[in-house]
Image: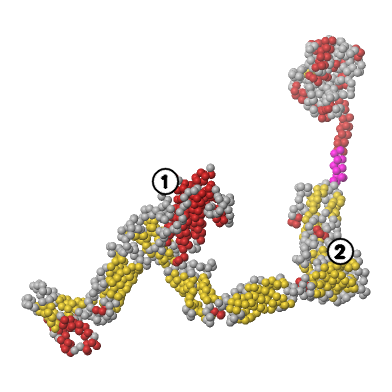
Amino acid sequence: MLDISLCLKRPSWLVDSKRMRMTSDFQWLLLTVLLLYLTNQVNSQEKRTLPDLKCVTNNLQVWNCSWRVPSGAGRGAAYEVCIENRSHSCYQLEKDIKIPPLLPGDYEITVNPLYGFGSSKSKFILNEKNVSLIPETPEILNLSADFSTSTLHLKWNDKGSVFPHYSNVIWEIKVLRKKNMEIVKLVTYSTTLNGKDTVHHWNWTSDMPLECAIHYVGIRCYIDDPQFSGRKEWSNWSLLKNISWPPDSQTEVFPQDRVVLAGSDITVCCVTQERVLSAQIGSTHCPLIHLDGENVAIKIRNISASASSGTNVVFSVEDNIFGTVVFAGYPPDIPQKLNCETYDLKEIICTWNPGRPTSLEGPRSTSYTLFESFSGKYSRFSGNKVSTNESYQLFFQILPNQEIYNFTLNAQNLLGQTESTLLINVTEKVHPRIPTSVKVKDINSTAVTLSWHLPGNFTKIKLLCQIKINKTNSEHELRSVTMRGVESSNYLTTVDKLNPYTIYTFRIRCSTDPFWKWSKWSKEKQYLTKEAIPSKGPDTWREWSSDGRNLIIYWKPLPINEANGKILSYKVSYSSDEETQSLSIPDPQHKAELQLDKNDYIISVVAKNSAGLSPPSEIASMEIPNDDLKIEQAVGMGNRILLTWNYNPNMTCDYVIKWCNSSQSEPCLMDWKRVPSNSTETVIESDQFRPGVRYNFSVYGCRNQGYQLLRSIIGYVEELAPAVAPNFTVEDTSADSILVKWEEIPVEELRGFLRGYLFYFEKGERDTSKIMGLESGRFDIKVKNITDISQKTLRIADLQGKTSYHLVLRAYTGAGMGPERSMFVVTKENSVGLIIAILIPVAVAVIIGVVTSILCYRKREWIKETFYPDIPNPENCKALQFQKSVCEGNGALKTLEMNPCTPNNVEVLETRSVAPKIEDTEIISPVAERPEDSPDTEPGNHVVVSYCPPVIEEELASSGAEEGGGASQVIYIDVQSMYQPQAKPEEELDSDPVGGAGYKPQMHLPITSAVDDLDADDDLDKTAGYRPQANVNTWNLVSPDSPRSTDSNSEIVSFGSPCSINSRQFLIPPKDEDSPKSSGGGWSFTNFFQSKPND
Amino acid sequence: MPPSLPVPCLRGFCTSPHNPQAPFCLLTLLLPPLSLGAPISTAESINQAYNLALDMQIQTSALLQIYLEHQGTPFSDPNFSSPGLSLRTLPSTDMPFEIWHGLEDGEHLSLTQKAFWSFSQHFQLAKDDQSDLNPGHSIVVDQLEEARLKAKGLAGNLAGIMTALDLPTPPANTPLGSVPLGDSVFERKCRGYVIIRDYSFWTDRAVTFLGELKAKYSE
């Protein structure tokens, strides 16, 4: 066997051509013979029997050949195998043979059973193509896991030392998960065999945390040897190795605090002994993936970027929750706007913008490192110190003798890293700090020294500084200054060309050469320059007082740029040919009043400040008269007004225009303005000007001797409409005209040049007429435009008499109409018409009266017959015949005197309750009736009166209607005549009419009141016999309708007035002295219509 | 400032977040009454402790709400609750009411004092956790710091009351040892939640107990 092994080894070297040369010829021949023999044997076997020889190699150095043992051969049968090649080689073997690899080609192999087992000799033909290369089963040296990263680490040995030459090897690795060994990963891995044993590593990161389930790993290989022509096959799988999380009773969730890329997928599992009910990420519930036991997992796809506190993944069991926090974010963005500069050439400050937020904060935030490649130094940024404006910065100390810096800014977080680079020359990137300690010192009134401090080491460079000079009410001025840099020191410069006594504000900023950036402006430093003497004398004017005795000198305060300091006082001097006098006026006062004796004086005014006196301003006192002076008008615009005048060659010095408010009394001066002598116009502008105010402008020309008033102008900078309406009154009114007079509007109220008046009038009453829209041109409104402003009256003619007119008056200026004032006037009545209107009806009435009278006169007989026939005389009536003595008594005896008549009607009056009843009483006499009256019967009852009413046909008509078919004949009794025949009988004249016995006239019955009743009763007891019916008082009491006397003056109490016998209305009401109604006495027409007398 | 000054810390005064004098007010509440020389009556001490506990009780719900709002869902979900979570280093909330009610005042004071001392230390933990977790949201950290100070102050007040009542002085306050539930961010979030939740339980208990004690000693 040792020999064979020797022989087996050597052929492997034969493959190498170099080594082949080193073998001995003997060995070469021997092996050749052996191979030829084996080849022949194989060929002979093929020829005779099908070969069962199978040769396999796993390292290409030894072929392991085996054949099927004949059924008759027992165990331990031995064979002699001979290979026919160049050297015939034979081996005694039992079952299989290990032979060295043969060169390409066929080799006969002869197998002879030994010891005579009866088998025949077999021959096989062997070729390399029939040999299979099956590598040895690989062995996993180590399988480990990094649970934090869910990574498996596999380690194995390729055992390359056993292979004779370089070969490519393909490894196949499989990862199985869970106890049921689900393949989760199958991967190939290529290496090369280099003749040495090499340990290989393979890492695999699981998408599921390794803690969630057990993981198995197996490996096999495939050797792809290009020189081997036989069949190549995969090796067997290695023994599986596994990784599992140590079992624990506690529930745990994996992975914990994992930082993942936003948008990626992640699997989270819960290792537990309890039953998991649900799982959720954020507020989203996820389906459970069941693993071994009660373990579950969820797969989160495309996870969103987390908030600061991360994204919670929670597994809920029955009464508890378990979870983990996933931080989904982004790797750092490339640092943007990286800029490195220095403030002071001592330290470099680099700033940058982090770019897109990573959504990772706190311990997971991005860390930055600033690395300088020339020096190899670096500076690190702590992620917690984030600047407020999201700009990061790092400081780097400047190194001596190094000006060029190559910076690399590295940004890194758990998801990745980026970097940005910058190469700078630090001397060109100087951004000086803000200058401090700015100080100013005087040199003179127009120059100062300015100093400031600038921190930094600028010894090697130049500084360029700017000085911003601000003066009140003027634009700022920039001045630049270049200076050598020094080491943290003060810098000094001179600022000249300043104005005296002026407040300046200085600010400074600096940069370096070459320019990179300006520093910020320093704080303002305010400084007042020194005073100088006033550069000019004050502008002067003079006015004579109203009495012409005093001259008032006015001067304007010097502007600050001419005063050159604080003006302390003014010196006013006036000199004539004879004398010179002066006086000092303190500053706030800008005028002086001088008493001059009419001489021509030259007045000079000098301003004084602490630095000295100004040049004098001189003005002559004399005023040259001007006879040809007219007052003109002018209107300006806004707050300015243009004044012009003719060129006058006599005016040798300036023109002066002075103005004042026209309402002020003289001497009046608001302001003045000097205009050069060659000017013919100027614009007067003043903030004091107000619209609607009248100003007087005076243009003076200046000669050597004095000033002459050239023009006097009244003007407005802007006209306004009048503020008030003109007061107007009506002077005279007639039937067809009105004379109106108005007053002038005061200048203050006029507010412009008066252009005229507008007078409106229309018919209308107060409160009913209102002139609306005066400008709208209503037809019923008449308008008169009075453009003659001197006119103050207006007569309005052609008006209607006794008509109310509405008058309105308005004034207008160039700016428009003023307010209106209105008045209502009624024209007088037309008297002729009135007279005619009265006289005509009167005349007509008179004529009608006259005609009627004439007619009545002429027809009086007829009228009398018709309307007033003769009344029969009762005396002729026997029934009514009284004794003569009775009827012809004293006239004072007021008894009924019956005329001799023949009554044809008698009215019988009953009590009020009984309707009047008119009967035909042709024959019945009242006397005949009376005896039948009961003595107790009231006098009002059953009184029969014959009476004669006045002529009232209407009454008759109504009576006739009431009576129906009753007596229509009316008997009129002349009252006066009726009385006379009924005069009291003479017997009664001497006797008391009450106390007397016998017949008593009715009117004397005193039945008026209760007392009277008593008296009457007494009287009744005393009297007997006939009781007269007529008693006024009785009528009063008993019947309101009873007639009363109307003759109050008469002592004779009448029975009543004549009344219609058909009417109960008394035509002549009785007199009642107590009643005011009757106080008027006489016959009142109103009494006639009185339907019911007062009770 | 002498402790015998009238307590200006009315409820509305101290609880107003915009009150510029709130820090001084809080300082007054937290002053251990016996650490200063001037004596203070027992009733006043109890009243002061009661007012502080009352203020803490009012602030607790806001503290819990702000805390949970900054932890993300499901913590920030409305009505979030997880009774299964617990922290063994926290004062126990398991004691049945009957047993608690049957304890003497001294035992009540002792247990409550220990509880709030423990809470003050746990709040420190929670505050550190949130500083890492929510560096941009200082309101959570500020609220936890305020709760820590108040818990510490109440523990001091209770110790003072015990001394005033001649009860055994509470043992020296020992530092908090290792606290579980701190291995992961999720556990730290839960830990903060449990601390505030149990703190709420104990503030309720303290208000009730101190209210009774106040009534007893004000008679």
Give the residue pinned by disc 2.
A666
Residue at 37%, 62% (x, y): give it.
Answer: A254
Q: CA distance from mark 2 to mark 1?
A: 109 Å
Percent coordinates x, y for residue A321 in the rendering? 39, 56
The magenta stretch is A829-842
Q: Is residue A439 left or right of residue B164?
A: right
Residue at 71%, 78% (x, y): give it.
Answer: A496
A674 shown above or below B43? below
Callout 1: helix, strand or loop? helix
Magenta region includes residue A360: no
Chain of the residue on which disc 1 is drawn: B
Name the foreground residue: A179 vs A803. A179
Q: Is residue B86 left or right of residue A431?
A: left
**Amino acid on which disc 2 is placed:** Glu
Magenta region includes residue A832: yes
Q: Quadrant of residue A161?
A: bottom left
Q: Which mark is residue B99?
A: 1
Chain of the residue on which disc 2 is drawn: A
Density class for disc 1 (Cα within 10 Å; few <14, some 14-19, many ≥20) is few
A571 shown above or below A1091? below
Percent coordinates x, y for residue A286 in the rendering? 38, 59
Quadrant location, the N terminus of chain B = bottom right
Contact (CB < 8 A) between labels 2 and 1?
no
Q: How is the image coloured?
A: secondary structure
**Amino acid on which disc 1 is placed:** Ile
Percent coordinates x, y for residue A874 in the rendering? 86, 16
Q: Which mark is residue A963?
A: none
Can residue A193 be seen from the camera position used here?
yes
Callout 2: helix, strand or loop? loop
A270 shown above or below A825? below
